[in-house]
Image (spheres, rainbow, N blue to C red):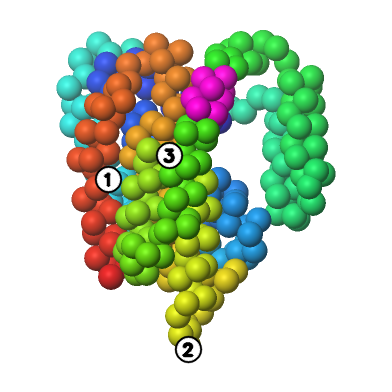
Amino acid sequence: MLLIRPLLKTNSERKYTYHIPVFFIFVVSNIGGSLTPLGDPPLFLGYLRGVPFGWTLNLFPIWLTTLAIVLGVFYVWDTRCYRKETLADLQRDRAAARPLRISGTLNLLFLLIVILSVFLQFPFPYREATMVAMSILSMVCTKKELREQHGFTFAPITEVAILFAAIFITMVPLLALLEMKGAELGITRPWQFFWLSGGLSSFLDNAPTYLTFSFLAESVTRSQDLAGIPVIAGVRADLLRALSCGSVFMGANTYIGNGPNFMVKVIAEEQGVAVPHFFEYMLYSGLVLIPVFLIVTVVFFL
C-alpha cells in the first residue's frame, strides 16, 4: 500500500501501463511476502499457531525461483510496452522526473512499533491495541496536506472490508467440510497441498484457507510414521512448506485471493489508471502464473 501510489505516479506519463498493477499484485502483494510472517496474512496465522518466526526463511529457494521467473516475464513485457510509447510521452516522462523523497517520516516509527508488536508476540489484546494506537497516532501526527498529495482515501479499505466480510461468511461451510472430510480425499502429498490450498486461496481469502489446510496437514501428520521426517508446529515440514507457498503464491490468481489485491485495483482506479476487470485479470494470472507454479511444483514439491 505504501508502494503502489508512487509506482503509478512514476509511470503516469506512459500510455501502455495496463500490465503494471497486475504484476505489482503478483510480486508485491503476494509472492514477495512469503519469507516472514509479516509478509502475508497466512504466514502470520501460522506464526500464531506455533510456527517459528524464522522458519519461513526456509522458503527462500522457492521464493527466489518464483520471483525470478515472474520478474523476468515482467521485464520482457514492460520493455515491449515501453517501446510502443510515443516520443512525446517519453519526453514528458523525463521532464517530469523528480528525486524520490520521503515525507512524514514519523510514521516509520509507528510502523516499526507495529512490526515489533508482532515479532515480540504481544499477547491479545495488547498487540491489537498497539496497532490501533499507532494508527490513531499516524492520523493525528501526519499533516493533512501530505495525505492529499498522496491521494490517500479510505475507499479502498472500505470496499475490501465489505467484500471480504461477505467472503468470510460464505466460505465457512466449505472450509469446515474440508477440515472434517479432507483426510478421506487422500490429500497427503506436498504437491496436493500446494495446489489445493492455492486453488481455494485463489477464490476464497488465503488466510483462513491456510488455516484449514494446516489443520488438515496436522491430521495427516498424526496418522503417519514420522521416522526421520521433521515436524514444525505439529505439521510435517514438507506439507507446511507446500501449503504455505500455495496459499501465499496463489492468492495472486484473482482479485479476491488476498485483500491487498483488491485494494491495489481500487487505488489504481482512483488514480485514473486503467486496470483489467475480474476475468481479464484471471487471463493474466493464467498466462503468467500457472506455468510458473507448474515449474515450482516439479522442482520443489514432487
Decide: is 66 above or below 154: below
Q: Looking at the picture, which amino acid does disc 1 mark?
A: Leu
- Residue 141 visible, this orientation: yes
Residue at horizontal 32%, vertical 55%?
195
Q: Secondary structure at mark 3?
A: loop
Q: Earlier in the sequence, mark 1 or mark 2?
A: 2
Relative to residue 216, is residue 113 drawn left or right? right
| Residue picked out by circle 3 | 204
- Crowding near pointer 3: few (<14 within 10 Å), some, many (20+)? many
| Residue picked out by circle 2 | 227
Q: Earlier in the sequence, mark 3 or mark 2?
A: 3
Relative to residue 151, is residue 268 drawn left or right? left
Q: Secondary structure at mark 2?
A: loop
Q: Looking at the picture, which amino acid does disc 3 mark?
A: Leu
Residue at horizontal 49%, vertical 49%?
176
**Which label sits in the foreground, 1 or 3?**
3
- Crowding near pointer 2: few (<14 within 10 Å), some, many (20+)? few
Which of the two residues, 21 or 121, is positioned nearer the viewer here? 121
Relative to residue 95, is residue 105 drawn left or right? right
Which of the two residues, 203 or 222, is positioned nearer the viewer here? 222
Q: Residue 24 occupies which quadrant of the picture?
A: top left
Rendered-image quadrant of the C terminus: bottom left
Q: Earlier in the sequence, mark 1 or mark 3?
A: 3
User: Residue 227, percent across and down?
Assistant: 47, 89
User: Residue 173, percent across and down?
Assistant: 47, 42
Q: How many marks?
A: 3
